[in-house]
Amino acid sequence: MGCFTFIKVMMILFNLAIFLSGGTLMGVGIWVAVDDQSFVEIFGALSSSVLQVVHVGYFLIAIGAILLVIGFLGCYGAQKDSKCLLMMFFSVVLIIFIAEIAAAVVALVYTGFAEMLLTAVVTPVLQEKYGKDQSFTKIWNATMKEVECCGLNNYTDFTNSSWYMEHKLYPDACCNYQQPCNATLAAKTNVTGCFDQILKEIKTNAGVVGGVAAGIAALEIAAMAVSMYLYCRLDQK
């Protein structure tokens, strides 16, 4: 087996694994989006404090769809010796790679901007669904209990929420589970928001996060290099 054939076979197998992983993630994402209550009951109320701040199902569907596209382009392009598909594969991975670098820079340099963006997106949903949507409320209660936080920023995220309008109280987590959790007690307790707690947790495990990020970046660079190698070798045939 020549070098070209070996690399081609490895490219096909690697991207087939990516394709299958993407399909699995999409399936799980659809399951969570349709029936998140059963997902929480099976895997526990707090499988990941970061993912529970956003819509887990839609996040998994998006990631799964991206992996499906990458896997298909890489696998089929290598199998059929298609220069067009290999170039598309290279372009998609390159765009993702650049986007990841940009996101990392924003996360490191513009943490305040990231917080403002999350606040603009998450807080309205929190105010609308907390207390009304049973699954949403259960996940947030579990998150606040496990992470020892309140809301995204602090207790004021619940001030105009449906929950507060109905009960005139804040969630018990905002007062370290002292009752009644009114505005005075919540302000006095001053429980940290979940964004700050999660950010602190990420910084504490910076080595692990950095290692995973470096590993993903290395795989992306390798995938781009292999696809470009196959692309150039096809020109020589």
Image (cartoon, rainbow, N blue to C red):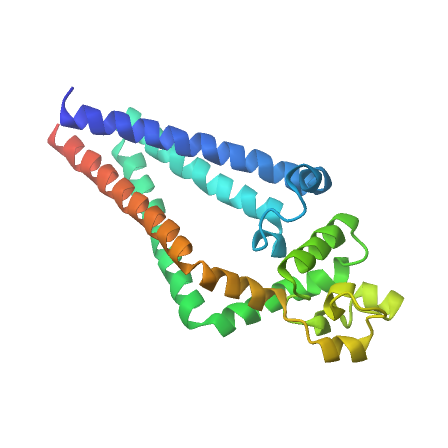
Which quadrant does the N terminus fall into? top left
8, above or below 26, in the image: above
Nearest the viewer among 120 and 142 is 142
Circle count: 0
Determine the residue positioned at 22% across, 29% down. Answer: 7
List x then y, in percent, for residue 45. 68, 47
* Camera sees residue 171: no
**Residue farthest to the top?**
1
Image quadrant of residue 67? top left
124, above or below 32, in the image: below
Asked whether, in this view, residue 172 is left or right of residue 153, the answer is right
Determine the residue positioned at 29% across, 47% down. Answer: 218
List x then y, in percent, for residue 212. 38, 49
Nearest the viewer among 103 and 78 is 103
169, above or below 81, in the image: below
List x then y, in percent, for residue 230. 20, 34
Which quadrant does the C terminus fall into? top left
Determine the residue positioned at 41% across, 68% down. Answer: 108
Determine the residue positioned at 68% across, 42% down. Answer: 40
* Camera sees residue 34: yes
Nearest the viewer among 64 and 219 is 219
Asked whether, in this view, residue 203 is left or right of residue 35, the answer is left
List x then y, in percent, for residue 12. 31, 27
**Residue farthest to the left?**
236
